[in-house]
Image: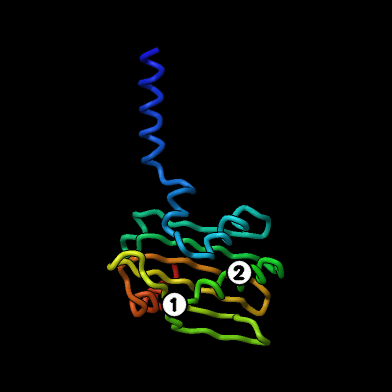
Amino acid sequence: MKQIRYIGVILLLLASLVPGPVQAMEMQKGVRIAEVFQRYGKKKNVTMVELSNELLETYGMAHYKSIVIKDDPDALRFIRECLEADQQGARKIKEVTDDGGVISAYYQLPGRENDLNRFILFKLNKKRIITLVYIEGDLDSDDLISILFTRQDL
């Protein structure tokens, strides 16, 4: 019986060390777009990417998550609702609207910690492909712009 309890304790400790959905949600705590990743992340015609710490440290990031959704009007409507909520209190670095709806946005959200900046990037292209990116890190908006326009492997 002691051995079973011992194994159970070890498994719980190991499970707490592995990043999972709960920790990913914790990183995006207070951000409504987290619901987009949860709701659409595993659906058909969707690509979701979450980068590992090794890759992120190179760019001064603590968390990177992106989702690309192909031609889904319901998802677009939901994402725009989430963006509307998340932009409250955020710094609008860029926002483009067309026909009454946001088609491109770059917001810097208030950080949860002093040295941690949070960003949301959104783009709807002419083929109705939606791209949504969430980034946390010690980089600032200028650093992020440099990375986006000089690196092709993100």
Spot the residue most to the top.
Answer: 1
Tell me if 82 is positioned left or right of 19 in this view.
right
41 vs 134, left or right, is right
Q: Is residue 101 above or below residue 22?
A: below
Q: Residue at (43%, 62%) from the top-left corner?
A: 64
Residue 110 is tagged as: none
Q: Which residue is mark 2?
A: 79
Determine whether the residue tagged by mark 2 lies in a helix, strand or loop. helix
Q: Provide residue 127's location: percent of width, then percent of height.
A: 68, 76
Residue 16 at what x, y percent from top left? Answer: 38, 39
Asked whether residue 66 appears in the rendered view, the answer is yes
* Screen quadrant of the C terminus: bottom left
Q: Which residue is mark 1?
A: 90
Which three-letter amino acid code belongs to the residue tagged 1? Ala
Q: Sequence-wise, which precedes: disc 2 or disc 1?
A: 2
Q: Residues within 10 Å of mark 2 (few under 14, many from 20)?
A: many
Examine the rendering and report whether any part of residue 59 can be seen. Answer: no
Picture coordinates of residue 141 (x, y %)? 36, 78
Instruction: Give, as a three-letter code, the residue at label 2.
Output: Ile
Q: Position of residue 41 (x, y in %)?
A: 59, 56
User: Marks 2 and 1, how far apart in space?
Assistant: 16 Å
